Image: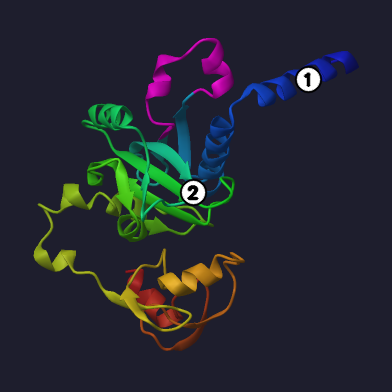
Amino acid sequence: MGFFDSLSKAAKVLVDDLNTPESFKIGEKFEKYSREVIFPQNKYKLLKQTHDYSQNNKDYVDESKEPDFKFQCLETKKEFYVECKFRSYLYEGKIQFCKQYQFDRYKDFSKGKDVFVLIGVGEDPAYPDNVCLIPLDEIKSINLTESFLEKNAIPNNKPVFASKLWSLNSSKKSEKLPESSKKVSSGFCIRCKEKLDLNLEHPLCRKCYSEWSKYKNPDYKEKYCHSCGKSHETSILKPVCYNCFKEVSR
């Protein structure tokens, strides 16, 4: 490639960027984050991704109406789809994650398929403050409340594990599980020891998570074991003591 060829390519990238509406740039940044952080290559194989604004502006690809990603979980070999949505803030305690016609289309598409909606909220779509992962089957309206989003929150700084991903499809499993299997174990906030549901993916209470998200250091030393509540050096990446780790890993 010659010098002028390089200049020509750089100029084309600049023109494409200038011609891309801001809302599409935000969406593309969040999709990039979703692939690199939440569904990385070492855990999820990318089978399909919808075309970007530049391509669709020239010649619209009908498959772009489908969810943004189609992945295969490397651990389970199951295939699933992910639709990514980023919002800067909540309005009156909720967000509208899509238009009604889009929601209807997602519902029709999802029949017989596993489809998830990944929602990011914050100032930067490349590193959102809060992230939620929700099975499409669990969503009944285009307007999602803060409490609903909080219930489906996941860490914003590490991949979602296969066990967590497939456990989200609780509505599909609820008829098959005995009542004892539905019980949620109690745990503790690893920073303040407040009682909360045992969730290794989210071991901080709401208040402490808000404080932690200012710096987002997954190795920051915390005070308590998420499982037993005893004083122990823990972190977001290692939220339980060794004895509890052996129990929860069984």
Residue marked by disc 1: 11
Instruction: Tell which of 133 and 214 is nearer to you.
Output: 214
| Residue at the image position 53 percent from the left and 52 percent from the top | 128
Residue 249: percent from left, percent from top: 36, 69
Q: Secondary structure at mark 2?
A: helix
- Name, please, the residue furthest toward the right: 3
Give the extent of the magenta segment: 51-70
Vertical position of residue 61 compared to residue 43: above or below: above
Q: Would you say residue 54 sits in the magenta stretch? A: yes
Q: Is residue 103 visible?
A: yes
Q: Nearer the viewer, mark 1 or mark 2?
A: 1
Residue 171: percent from left, percent from top: 18, 50
Q: Earlier in the sequence, mark 1 or mark 2?
A: 1
Instruction: Tell which of 151 and 237 is nearer to you.
Output: 151
Amino acid type at mark 2: Ile
Vertical position of residue 21 compared to residue 45: above or below: above
Quadrant (top left, top right, bottom left, bottom right) of the C terminus:
bottom left
Amino acid type at mark 1: Ala
Residue 9: percent from left, percent from top: 77, 18
- State left or right for residue 11 relative to residue 189: right
Q: Is residue 2 visible?
A: no
- State left or right for residue 49 relative to residue 151: right
- Name, please, the residue furthest toward the bottom: 231
Residue marked by disc 2: 38
Identify the image quadrant of residue 104.
top left
- State left or right for residue 167 relative to residue 74: left
| Residue at the image position 44 percent from the left and 40 percent from the top | 85
